[in-house]
DNA sequence: TGCATCTGTTCGCTATCGCCGAACAGTAAC
DNA sequence: GTTACTGTTCGGCGATAGCGAACAGATGCA
């Protein structure tokens, strides 16, 4: 707990830190929280009992866990984007058609957030899940999105966030990245070749409004073992782009 | 803002009240919040800037709105029930088959919470949505759930929550309600005949573990106009019960 | 263009209330 | 039945959350 900016309310910061701790540690009690944050048991108890009486955490077998009330907030936040309802059936279909994992992403504060994710028959497990965030520069969805952003916003991303190396395939050179983005613009789709996770690739396309503004992106993940082998990249990309177009139409007339 | 129990942290209560306000009012600014809670602008600003810097609310066109970070909490809470992944495809199929609205519910603190909801072709719009909560006593999902709860917990529900009247069809007499629950047990499914919303009916079945413990429930909503008319109740109920059984099997082997 | 009126932000001051530590009370373990 | 954990309650101190006023942008209207 370092200084933190002034005018901020500490107990609120603490409460959310505790919530994140409960989430990530798969349940915690008073003592756990007191130890984890080096506060007294009474303080931890105060936060936990407040959150519990508000229903944001629930007691399950003596450990507090994240309550379902957050579902409503999450769902509400998602519905703002007017994308979920339109994109869900397309993503499901794409996953079924390809047998792989398919995801829908939007961007908030320059972070990619998966608002939907669905798995086909042979999809491999990854760390991506609904609500999870990822870098934009090393994902197919992220690059699809960045490519259709105004130039100044792309530059703002490069400056404020940068190109952190995730694997040895991550593009970290700004100039090369601009070229990559240019390629995405020309081709209308993005590729991620093990740039975020070794062995995992993805192909994505932006979801645009009719005016050409980018709302989010859709992608299909394919493990390297199936690339060249069983997967026809051109056909897959065509399917993805078609889905993206359908979603555009659906969001327009709804 | 009345007294509230001691040992509770007020600023945390306030912050969550503000979050709920932002959610329900579709966006709010510093002045809105200050007015709504009769606090000074600086206080409102403190809460909002804290929440914003944590990323839990985001500035959209000068109004704060709920951030997507809650999606991760919601998704996490839902995944605890090990029901969503197994039930989603069944619900989708049921909605497609019947053309109506289908929902999956679990219970937290004696409140029914929809963890999934999907609409068929001719489904009518209702107020139910993912994360939304409903009474147990006047819904098909709720009655399905209560029927498979141990007797003492059912009695605890009647005592602690009670049978509030929602429409003139709501069962409000405890003795009649116990009979209704007995009927659900015998038949293995529950009916809601305009007991929560005028004109809306639903048919539901419990989702059980192999040991017979109730995990949640699944239901299909049908407007009164289509009952008797186009919908064959017996067939519909059979489909729902079959889906519930499939979900049980899926949750067991996953 | 200028005035008026919104918005959000910053800054001391004060009283509140969040935090602490110790004592207490349940509960599981052995 | 004793031990060693849990979580809970209780004063007391001191940090801090909240207030109000003053400031600063933004927007709108004439």
Image: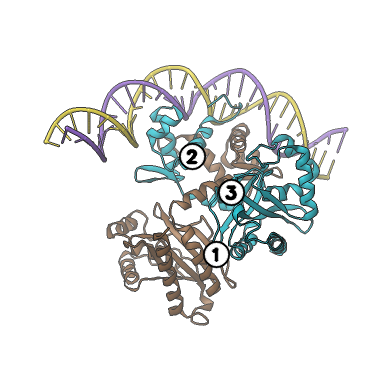
Chain colours: A brown, B cyan, C yellow, D purple
For the C terminus of chain B, the image quarter is: bottom right
- Is B25 situated left or right of C24 in this image? left
Tag 2 and tag 3 share a subunit: no
Chain identity of mark 3: A
Q: Where is residue A131 in the image (x, y as percent from the top left)?
A: 51, 55
Q: Of discs 2 and 3, which sits in the foreground?
A: 2
Answer above or below: position of B186 versus A95: above
Nearest the eye: A154 or A249: A249
Q: In the picture, residue A4 is in which quadrant?
A: top left
Q: Name the residue that disc number 3 marks.
A: A23
Tag 1 and tag 2 share a subunit: no
SS under mark 2: helix
Q: In the picture, residue A126 is in which quadrant?
A: bottom right
Give the distance between the C-alpha atoms of the residues marked 2 and 3, in whole angstroms. 19 Å
Label placed on residue B19: 2
Proximity of marks 3 and 1: CB atoms separated by less than 8 Å: no
- Is B45 situated left or right of B193 in this image? left
Q: In the picture, residue A57 is in which quadrant?
A: top right
- Is D14 situated left or right of A160 in this image? right
SS under mark 3: helix
Label placed on residue B94: none
Q: Name the residue that disc number 1 marks.
A: A118
């Amino acid at each position: 707990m370092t200084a933190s900016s002034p005018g901020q309310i500490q107990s609120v910061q603490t409460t959310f830190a505790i919530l994140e701790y409960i989430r990530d540690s798969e349940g915690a009690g008073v003592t756990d929280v007191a130890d984890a944050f080096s506060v007294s048991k009474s303080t931890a108890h105060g936060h936990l009992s407040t959150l519990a009486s508000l229903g944001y955490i629930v007691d399950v077998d003596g450990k507090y866990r994240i309550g379902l009330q957050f579902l409503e907030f999450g769902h509400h936040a998602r519905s703002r984007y007017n994308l979920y309802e339109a994109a869900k059936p397309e993503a499901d279909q794409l996953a079924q058609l390809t047998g792989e994992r398919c995801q829908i992403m939007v961007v908030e504060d320059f972070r990619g957030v998966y608002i939907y994710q669905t798995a086909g028959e042979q999809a491999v497990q990854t760390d991506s899940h609904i609500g999870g965030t990822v870098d934009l520069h090393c994902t197919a969805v992220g690059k699809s999105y960045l490519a259709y952003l105004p130039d100044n916003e792309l530059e703002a991303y490069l400056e404020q966030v940068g190109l952190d190396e995730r694997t040895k395939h991550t593009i970290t050179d700004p100039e090369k990245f601009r070229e990559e983005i240019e390629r995405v613009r020309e081709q209308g789709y993005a590729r991620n070749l093990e740039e975020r996770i070794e062995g995992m690739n993805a192909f994505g396309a932006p979801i645009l409004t009719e005016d050409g503004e980018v709302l989010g992106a859709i992608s299909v993940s394919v493990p390297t073992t199936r690339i060249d082998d069983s997967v026809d990249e051109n056909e897959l990309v065509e399917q993805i782009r078609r889905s993206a177009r359908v979603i555009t139409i659906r969001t327009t007339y709804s």
